[in-house]
Amino acid sequence: MNQIKKMWTYTGNKRPPFADEPKKGEESVWDYPRPPITDPDSRHILVKAEGVTLAETDHAVRVLETASPPTFYIPPDDVRTEFLEKASGTSFCEWKGRASYWNVTVNGQKIAKAAWSYHNPSERFKKIDGYFSFYPALVDCYLDGENVIPQPGSFYGGWVTSDIVGPMKGEPGTGGW
């Protein structure tokens, strides 16, 4: 337990010695704050499944949290909700509150829990109320044309792009973070 507590002495103010040094134009996940914050992002986002566009926007909000790649939330008006169906189950984030999950069905193919959203999140996260985020491990996500790589680990939904350096939560040996 002490190792875990020691790890969270890194809250975005100082990188741990094992963190990769970002080059010009890169961001270190260790420079993101804890508690996390929202950050408006005007880069072009495209989300597809089975070749069908599910979402497209230039008005996303990133959630930035120490040790994790950004998670992108898309305004509901920019999501084709006709392809979404509420899934069973919820989860709870200590920062944002209760998340709902969404199945995606396209061309007769159902992708279980490919997206999630927060409705009535905590005050700090009101900017993402009703917005949708997609798991890049389950659907095709693009940020300014770059194909997003899913955050390592089976639970996380962060978007890894060429401008993000770690190591990041979800990689082998990071279970205690």
Image (spheres, grey):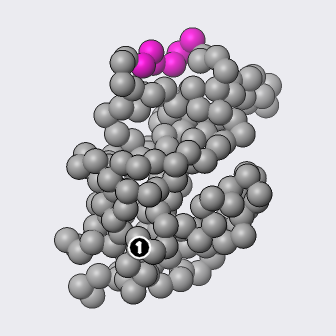
Where is the N terminus found, in terms of image quarters?
Answer: top right
Residue type at tag 1:
Val
Q: Tell me what residue is drawn at x 59 percent, y 18 percent.
A: 15
Q: Is residue 138 above or below residue 103?
A: above
Direction top: furthest residue: 17
- Residue 173 in the magenta stretch? The answer is no
Q: Is residue 72 above or below residue 6?
A: below
**Residue 36 image point, x, y percent:** 66, 42
Answer left or right for 164 relative to 44: right
Tell me, yes or no, if residue 16 can be seen here.
yes
The C terminus lies in quadrant = top right
Q: Which residues are magenta?
A: 17-22
The residue that disc 1 covers is 79
Please give left or right for residue 12 compared with residue 62 in the image. Answer: right
* Horizontal side, residue 85 vs residue 138: left or right: right
How many numbered badges does the structure rendering display? Answer: 1
Q: Please tell me how crowded label 1 is: few (under 14), some (14-19), or many (20+) other residues with Cα within 10 Å.
A: many
Toward the left, the furthest residue is: 51
> What element does badge 1 sit on?
loop
- On screen, residue 28 above or below 122: above
Residue appearing at x 39%, y 42% in the figure: 160
Q: Quadrant of residue 108?
A: bottom left
Would you say residue 21 sits in the magenta stretch? yes
Asked if one can make out residue 154 in the rendered structure from this viewpoint, the answer is no
- Residue drawn at the location 34% of the way across and 39% of the way down: 161
Measuring from the top left, give residue 106's x and y in whole percent.
Answer: 29, 82
Please identify the dominant SS of the magenta region.
loop
Foreground of the two, 60 or 64 = 60
**Which residue is painted at 28% across and 47% down in the image?**
144
Residue 30 on image: x %, y %? 56, 26
